[in-house]
Amino acid sequence: MFRLMDRQISMDEAHFWMPEGHRKELEQTWPHIFRTQVIGMIPESRFADLYHATMGRPNVPVALLVSLSVLKEMLDLTDEALMSSFRFDMRFHYALGVTLDETELAIRTLYYFRAGVAGSEAVGATFDEVTDRIILALGLNTTRQRHDSTHIRSNIANLTRLGLFTRTLGHFLGCLSQGFPKHYANLPEEIIKRYGDRKGRFADAKASEGRRRLETAALDLWTLVERFREEETVCRLPEYQVLERLLREQCRFSEGEDGDLVVLKEPKEIASDSLQSPFDPDASYDGHKGVGYQVQISETCVKGNPIQVITRVAVEPAHISDQHAIIPALEDLQDRGIAPETMLADTSYNSGDNLITASQLGVDLVAPTPGKADPDGIGLGHFDLDLKDLGVRACPEGKQPISDMVGKDGETHNLRFDETSCQGCGLNLDCPAGKQGGRIRVHPWDVATAFNRIREESEAFKKAYAMRSGIESTNAECKTAHGLDEVWTRGQERVSFAATMKTLACNIKRFMRYQCARILEKEENFAGNPA
């Protein structure tokens, strides 16, 4: 049964019995800010749908469980250290407003809470609402923001290709032996010996033996998939579905004299979103950074702000291109009423389409143009461009097109210049229109890209873009201080929960640090200027 946290103060709280000097010192530190300002920002009602309205035992207050999740990440604690601090640390008692008899919280309650909220919209809503209230409380300016992604790992091991096969097969056999012992007992003895009784041994092949053993593992994989294909109860196992996925992604079939043969795909044939671990099917592969996930982070970067805060966080598989991330980020920020006027991002977020869409959202996307322009050639940027309608007014020599026909897509312009003029032009051999007999096809995103390439050479662009690098420090802070580089869980929903709590902890830490500094400043001013 859902209930809100009881905000009533109890005289049994330990801080009431502290010496006055100790209590005053406590009120100048982070527990006081957390107690008086932060915990009230947590939107408990967002989690109400996860509980029954009237039936069952009243829940442990959500504000308490979310607070513990934030403090775990803020202080980079293990679950055991977190619960120890909750039971015995007076700062935790004061920050959370609990008495000694309210600290009897089983660690499994925290586990159940995480499992229940993973994948829930309430987690993202908590980050959004707490961050928005921090922005409001400090009057932060959000008109200029920066965006970047950072690679993270879930709690999985790096596996070789052979290791992936053997771990996946062994994981399936372990589940089969537990849930379907009769099916397990009827398996070929050699398969049980290779992956059941000798877990991990088969994966430790010498390099010279790896290919031969990998081919054997592929055949064993196919054998198990085919053996249980008609067994509906086994087919419903997630572990069996992972087997099928591994076979589909890593192998293909070739016709032989004795029928179809299982053939291993070449490494270059395997997609980056293929299975990386049987224990985390959502993790994928990035060619530059490896296995795991990436976190898309937006952050304010206005010089006048007392602090900068992370405004948005989103977790996605590692193989997803950054180009697909910037527009959803801008739309989410716009929905919350904190959209920037200028968004700074690196080259990977820039495309003509993104520049146009961002502009339509009222945002100037400041990001370098991908690729390099030919310093000696003539590009679209040398034409007279219409930036309002994203079209072309004239060629580099000032000649206007004699016809402008819109293509079937309704956006592409098929321009035709006077061919005679083009042939007599000194730029004929270098001009993109001259090379095509006076004809050129121009899409609006070509114009946007050309304009962006021109303006990035300006001092104004370089000065504005210089602030983008500051988000690298935020990425480093989240990783070194809050453990974002390798989270403690697996699966995208759980990894997303952990990453959201870690970035929220970073925001709350910055907020509390600033508020504590204000308290100390007031104390010093009062001491120096007594009334």
Image: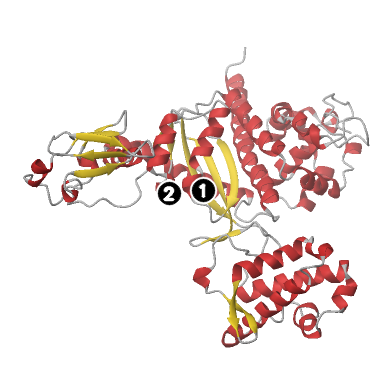
Q: Is residue 391 left or right of residue 194?
A: left
Q: In which quarter of the image is residue 63?
A: top right
Query: Dot 1: few (<14), some (14–19), or many (≥20) neighbours within 10 Å?
Result: many
Q: Residue at x 29, y 31 (%)?
A: 387
Q: In this view, does 427 lie to the left or right of 411?
A: left
Q: Which residue is drawn at 21% across and 44% down?
A: 439
Q: What residue type is labelled 2?
A: Ser
Disc number at residue 149? 1
The x, y position of residue 496, in whole percent, is: 66, 47
Q: Which residue is drawn at 61% across and 57% down?
A: 153
Q: Which amino acid does label 1 sit on?
A: Ser
The x, y position of residue 173, in whole percent, is: 79, 72
Disc number at residue 348? 2
For numbered disc 1, what is the local secondary structure? strand
Q: Is residue 439 left or right of residue 218?
A: left
Decide: is 408 above or below 183: above
Q: Do the residues labelled 2 and 1 touch (CB within 8 Å)?
A: yes
- Which quadrant, please, contains the C terminus? top right
Q: Is residue 76 visible?
A: no
For numbered disc 2, what is the local secondary structure? helix
Decide: is 150 above or below 527: below
Query: Dot 2: few (<14), some (14–19), or many (≥20) neighbours within 10 Å?
Result: some
CA–CA distance between discs 2 and 1? 10 Å
- Which quadrant, please, contains the N terminus? top right
The x, y position of residue 102, in whole percent, is: 89, 37
Earlier-in-chain disc, 2 versus 1:
1
Q: Which residue is drawn at 59% across and 43% down?
A: 314
